[in-house]
Amino acid sequence: MIDHLIQHRGGWLKGVGPNADIVISSRIRLARNIEGVPFPHWAKKPEAEHVLTLTKAVFEKTPLFKDSLYVRLDDMDSIDKQFLVERHLMSNEHAVRSAQKAVLINGEETVAVMVNEEDHLRIQAMTSGFDLEATWRTINAIDDAFAANLSYAFKPEWGFLTACPTNTGTGMRGSVMLHLPALVMIRQINRVLEAIAKLSFTTRGLYGEGTQASGNFFQISNQVSLGQREEEILDNIKGVIAQIIEHEEKARQALLSDHREMLEDRIWRSYGTLKNAHIISSNETVELLSMLRLGHDLGIVKGLNAALINELFILTQPAHLQKIEKKKLTANERDVKRAEIIREKLEVLS
């Protein structure tokens, strides 16, 4: 039911938009709950089913989701669920506990709605590059469409009521996925992350909550939404991200001016390994693709396509490899298939 997604590149992976050399994507997530129904962790099976029935009916009559995919998680196998996690279309928590849950995905894979995750609705919109304004316009229109047909749990003194108190208020979390290899290489990344933590921002890895940074990717988001308007949250995020971008740009220039030979050696070694390896692990792939992405962004490696490099980060993940092969693979078989796909993709661009 989700097999056709393997043929498409998610809109957030296009490698375009403001500061796309450093910012992979911008995302906004809204937490919403239905009035009078217990939060998912406390809801009984009939109550959770009622949420599924109610929300599906709203999705079907919302024009914004005319050509979208809607699927219940208990109709999916473990590979399909992990596949959607790898594509950033749902969370690990949603995949692990899948009874009475569903996910809605638009055709561009830039909007996804999780039903009965931590909240009844987790609505997310993603855009390529550093463009929180466009992301906000998209998700605000979707939220308005849902609100016209659902009674949200809301209190004037608190805002939107959510399962986790840190989401109460606007229920909004904005996050930006950044590629920061230069700050890692000059060993300044911890100083930067410690500084933003003091400003109530949190840092996660490539796959969000519960994951560690890998491949020099850092997902930075606001921690609290209570007591702040949406515009304030967005302005705060934009201000912090703009400073991090500036730090990364300066670090890249420092590497080019002071350590160019070392930098070029690492980039070309990474490219050479990716083009020639016949067995390669997921972790090594992410690290090498990070350096290749940096080489492309700095103009050291010519003729590459940023969108394809972005896509390779996703295509080479375990569930994607098994969807491509249409069968379960052992770890060794995945390492062989991963190397084959990378060689094929990079050969086309040579």
Image (tube, helix red, strand yellow):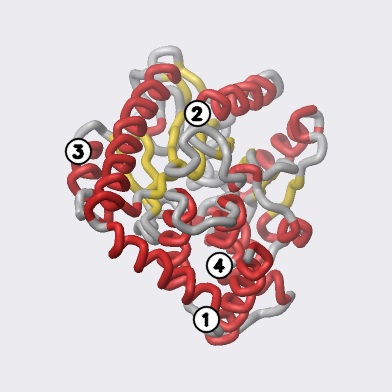
Front of the two marks 2 and 1: 1
The picture places residue 309, in percent across and down from the top left corner, at 56, 57
Taking 116 as reference, is 265 above or below it?
A: below
Front residue of this view, candidates 138 and 74 = 138
Q: Residue at x 52, y 52 (%)?
A: 91
Q: Amino acid at mark 2?
A: Leu
Q: CA distance from mark 2 to mark 3?
A: 22 Å
Compute the Cα span from label 4 to label 3: 32 Å
Which residue is at a point 70% across and 36% down the rendered structure image?
Answer: 55
Q: Position of residue 295 (x, y in %)?
A: 44, 56
Disc 2 to disc 1, C-alpha distance:
38 Å
Q: Is residue 23 left or right of residue 248?
A: right
Residue 280 in sight in this render: yes
User: What's the amino acid at mark 3?
Assistant: Ala
In the image, 52 versus 79, the foreground residue is: 79
Residue position marked by numbered label 2 in the rendering: 132
Which residue corresponds to mark 4? 317
Front in this rendered view, residue 294 or 45: 294
Q: Position of residue 303 (x, y in %)?
A: 59, 56
